[in-house]
Amino acid sequence: MSSEKAPEKLQNKSTKIALILIRGLINLSADRLRTLKLLNLGKKHVCVVVEDNVITRGMATKVKDYVAWGEVDDATVKLLQEKRGKKDPKDSKKLKKYFTLAPPVGGFERGGIKTQFTKGGALGYRGDKINDLIKKMI
């Protein structure tokens, strides 16, 4: 057993990613539908903020044709909780695990909701640009 330290990326303790369901759930394969349900993405324009680890990144790449996702900063998470946070009816002290958003002001990117972000669309991995999309949708 070696006593090497974990890589620098894994030592970052509070990295979070946000996933937003852009397209609807019609004509989805059962496997992808199950993955979206596990991520609490039940309808369009719903955002979830989850811990960034290998499992959630794998789930995000599995449904990359239906969601936009990327690393979210703490200011955006705080803004989401203030503007769109709703109380859980079962426990009034806790917030729900998802945020319902409005369609983005000014619309999605020019490529639309059927093409990847790298090709000018709205889907897939965005990196830090997810913060701009969330602010347009609040």
Image: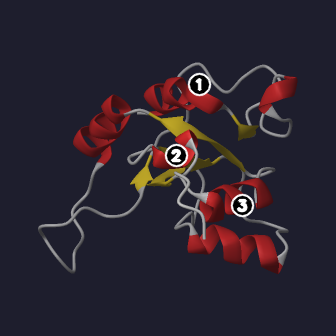
Percent x, y of residue 24: 71, 57
Q: Distance from label 2 to label 3 (Cα)? A: 14 Å
Check disc 1 and report its element: helix, strand or loop. Answer: helix
The front one of 1 and 120 is 1
Q: Position of residue 134 (x, y in %)?
A: 48, 33
Badge number at residue 129:
1
Callout 3: SS = helix
Q: Nearer the viewer, residue 12 or 68?
A: 12
Three-letter amino acid code at the position of disc 2: Ala
Q: Label 3 sits on what residue type?
A: Gly
Q: Which mark is residue 18?
A: 2
The vertical placement of 108 against 51, above or below, is above
Element class at badge 2: strand
Q: How far is the residue under mark 1 from the one under mark 2?
A: 11 Å
Please indicate, yes or no, whether residue 45 appears anywhere in the rendered image. Answer: no
Judged left or right of residue 22, residue 97 is: left
Q: Residue at x 49, y 28 (%)?
A: 131
Along the viewing direction, whichever of 68 and 136 lies nearer the viewer: 68
**Label disc, if present, on residue 2 of the rendered structure:** none
Residue corresponding to mark 3 = 58
Question: How did the renderer colour the structure?
Answer: secondary structure
Q: Quadrant of the N terminus?
A: bottom right
Please identify the quarter of the rendering in which residue 57 is found. Answer: bottom right
Label 3 crowd bin: few (<14), some (14–19), many (20+), radius 10 Å: few
Disc 1 versus disc 3: nearer the observer = 3
Is residue 57 in view? Answer: yes
Percent from the top left, x then y, of residue 75? 31, 29
Residue 10, placed above or below residue 123? below
Q: Quadrant of residue 138?
A: top left
